[in-house]
Image: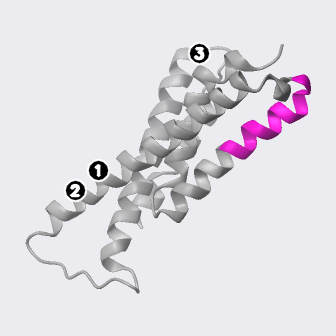
Amino acid sequence: MCSLLCSSDVIAAVSLVSYDKEPALYSIIFGEGITNDAVSIILFNTVMRYTGAKSTNKIDWTTPASITYMFTMLGFWSIIIGILFGLISAWLLKKYRSFSKNPITETTIIFCIGYIAYIVSEVSENSGIISLLTCGITMSHYSWFNLSP
C-alpha cells in the first residue's frame, strides 16, 4: 500500500512549479518522481511475489536478501529490455530508410517498439513501466537522429 501511495506524491509538487519559469527545478522534481515511481513499482512487484495469492515462498531469515536480489534483478532486466528495444528502434530507422518517407510510419514504428518493449517486459514478469521509460530515453538519444526532418 505504501509503495503505491508513495508514487503519487510528486504530482502535487510538479503542478506547483512552472516549466517555463523554473526549468531546472521542474526537471529535478520530475526526475525524482520518475525514480520514485520506478522504485515503488519494482518494490511492489518484488513483495507481491512473496505475499501474492499464487506465492509458494515462505518468509524466513533469508527473505530480506532474497527480496534485495529480486529487486535488483527485476530492475536490471527491465532496463536491459528497454535499452535493447530502444537500440532496435534506432537500428531499424537507420538501416531501412523507406520508413522515413512518411512521418506517420515513423511515428507508428516508434510507438509500436515502445509498446513491444512494455509487453515483453510484462510477459517476462519484469517492470513494463521501467522498460518503457528506458526505451524512451534510449530512443531520444539514438532514434531521434534517424528520423526524417
User: Which label's residue is closer to the chain start, 2 or 3?
Assistant: 3
**Amino acid carrying mark 3 in the image:** Glu
Q: CA distance from mark 1 to mark 3?
A: 34 Å
Q: Residues within 10 Å of mark 2 (few under 14, many from 20)?
A: few
- Residue 117 as seen in the image, left or right of residue 39: right
Q: CA distance from mark 2 to mark 1?
A: 6 Å
Q: Is residue 105 one of those drawn in magenta? A: yes
The disc placed on residue 72 is: 1
Magenta stretch, main secondary structure, is helix
- Residue 148 as seen in the image, left or right of residue 115: right
User: Which label's residue is closer to the chain start, 1 or 3?
Assistant: 3
Q: Percent position (x, y) of residue 35?
A: 43, 39
Q: CA distance from mark 2 to mark 3?
A: 37 Å
- Residue 108 as seen in the image, left or right of residue 91: right
- Residue 147 as seen in the image, left or right of residue 63: right
Residue 9 in sight from this viewpoint = no
The span picked out in magenta is 101-113
Q: Are marks 2 and 1 in contact (CB under 8 Å)?
A: yes
Q: Secondary structure at mark 1?
A: helix
Residue 11 in sight from this viewpoint = yes
Q: Secondary structure at mark 3?
A: loop
Q: Is residue 90 one of those drawn in magenta? A: no
Q: Secondary structure at mark 2?
A: helix
Q: Percent position (x, y) of residue 22?
A: 59, 15
**Amino acid carrying mark 1 in the image:** Thr
Q: Which residue position holds label 3?
A: 22
Q: Which residue position holds label 2?
A: 68
